[in-house]
Image: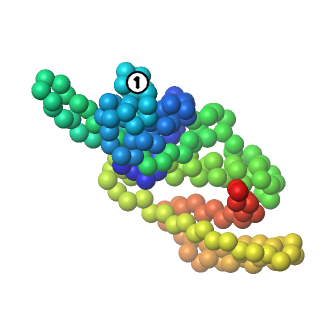
Amino acid sequence: MQDVEVIESPEAAAAALDPVRARLLNELVVPASAAGLAARVGIARQKVNYHLKALEAHGLVELSEERRHGGITERVLQASAASYVVSPAAVSASAADPDATTDHFSAAYLVALAGRLVREVGALARRARVTGTRLPTLAIDTEIGFRSAADRAAFADDLTAAVLDLAARYHHDDGRPHRLVVAVHPRPKEKP
């Protein structure tokens, strides 16, 4: 089971977002048969089987094991990932393009960058799984409290200068290209 799977297909996204199927995916972090799952969620086994077949057809659940009981074979399934992220590509072929946004300080630009990041890293991660290789990534996540808009602007200037200096120091025209995305946004308030 993967930690996170990026869903690129509109049909797979629709299957994963269906309330009953989303509940079954959540339950299938622990492998279960249709009968066991039906008992856990309080839905008829036949209905659970119907939804499991749809999830399996989209690669969202996979066979964990088969158990024989007399002449009956019980299939035990497990979610393909502990959690899922729907790529913007699954929603629309015209997913937000950061290159089409001129205001690089806008929320629209940041959302378009995030969408591109999900699309690109999702595709690279799938390719790495298929080839059995490790995908070289780096992520930094931290919080910073700015006392004023002036502090935030000075931080942005300093960060930009530092990143451009590092990029210039390590960039080689004949090297393998990597994408660096740095984002700053207000942290949402916690829900009560």
x%, y% of residue 118?
A: 57, 49
Number of numbered callouts drawn: 1
Most extreme residue toward the left, as rendered? 70
Q: Secondary structure at mark 1?
A: loop
User: With respect to residue 110, does 172 lie above or below?
Assistant: below
Quadrant location of residue 19?
Answer: top right
Specify whether residue 125 is in view: no
Mark 1 crowd level (few <14, some 14–19, many ≥20, 10 Å Cα) = few
Q: Residue at x 44, y 49 (%)?
A: 82
160 with respect to 72 (left or right): right
x%, y% of residue 79?
A: 39, 41
Residue type (three-letter) at the residue carrying disc 1: Ala
x%, y% of residue 81?
A: 42, 46
Q: Nearer the viewer, residue 135 or 9?
A: 9
Q: Looking at the rendering, in which quadrant would you find the C terminus?
A: bottom right
User: With respect to residue 12, does 176 lie above or below?
Assistant: below
Q: Residue at x 46, y 50 (%)?
A: 4
178 with respect to 165 (left or right): left
Q: Which residue is mark 1?
A: 44
Q: Residue at x 13, y 23 (%)?
A: 71
x%, y% of residue 120?
A: 54, 49
120 with respect to 59 (left or right): right
User: With respect to residue 177, does 168 lie above or below?
Assistant: below
83 with respect to 108 (left or right): left
User: With respect to residue 2, does 178 lie above or below?
Assistant: below
